[in-house]
């Protein structure tokens, strides 16, 4: 277990170094968001592994904080779906009434409906469960790309002095 903790710490340090290199080389790239997320991810894994090594109530406190962040993430994913549908609908109304302008809100509306149906169904057929998994993977992909863009924009805004 100590070996895994050391590997997690090493990956945290290496991703932090890569983040530092991106900030110094070209802070306007999307790699800034990618390396920031990697650094935060490996920092969370390192903290978790250290708390497992130490034992005690630290694990419980960290689990509660992680559950809180997960609940916030789930709430933000629903908000993100609704925001994409709303703003895409506004673009469709104000610009051209074409099918490509309507595809993104329809996709996100479908993903949101799939997630709500999945939350209500207890025993779904295998083919429907595969569709639910596909919908979640698509939503996570779009959210990851959005978070990378958001983190890059926020970090870039902080470096514009």
Image: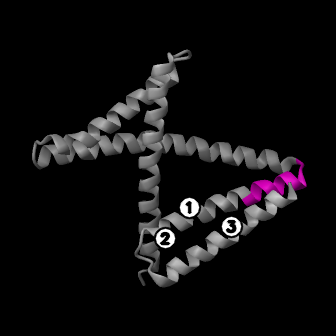
Classed neighbour count for the residue bearing mark 1: other residues with Cα under 10 Å, few (<14), some (14–19), many (≥20): some
Is 128 inside the magenta-drawn segment? no
User: Which residue occupies 62% across, 69% down?
Assistant: 15
Residue corresponding to mark 2: 32
Q: Position of residue 92 (x, y in %)?
A: 16, 44
Vertical relation: 14 (above or below) 87: below
Classed neighbour count for the residue bearing mark 3: other residues with Cα under 10 Å, few (<14), some (14–19), many (≥20): many
Image quarter hosting the C terminus = bottom left
Residue range of the region highlighted in magenta in the rendering: 46-56
Say whether residue 146 is left or right of residue 54: left
Q: Position of residue 155 (x, y in %)?
A: 47, 71
Q: Residue 12's mark?
A: 3
Vertical relation: 10 (above or below) 142: below
Q: Quadrant of residue 108?
A: top left
Vertical relation: 111 (above or below) 62: above
Helix, strand or loop at label 1? It is helix
Say whether residue 107 is left or right of residue 145: left
User: Which residue occupies 41% across, 61% down?
Assistant: 149
Residue corresponding to mark 1: 37
Measure how far apart labels 3 and 2 are at the Cα level. 15 Å
Measure how far apart labels 2 and 1 are at the Cα level. 9 Å
Q: Quadrant of residue 40?
A: bottom right
């Amino acid at each position: 277990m100590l070996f895994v903790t050391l590997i997690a710490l090493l990956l945290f340090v290496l991703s932090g170094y890569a983040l530092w290199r991106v900030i110094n080389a070209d802070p306007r790239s999307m790699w800034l968001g990618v390396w920031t997320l990697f650094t935060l991810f490996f920092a969370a894994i390192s903290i978790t592994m250290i708390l497992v090594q130490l034992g005690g109530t630290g694990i419980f406190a960290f689990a509660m904080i992680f559950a809180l962040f997960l609940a916030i993430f789930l709430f933000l994913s629903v908000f993100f779906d609704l925001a994409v549908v709303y703003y895409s609908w506004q673009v469709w109304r104000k610009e051209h009434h074409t099918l490509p302008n309507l595809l993104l809100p329809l996709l996100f509306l479908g993903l949101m409906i799939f997630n709500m149906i999945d939350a209500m169904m207890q025993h779904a057929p295998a083919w429907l469960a595969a569709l639910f998994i596909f919908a979640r993977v698509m939503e996570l992909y779009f959210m990851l790309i959005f978070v990378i863009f958001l983190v890059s924009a926020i970090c870039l805004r902080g470096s514009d002095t």
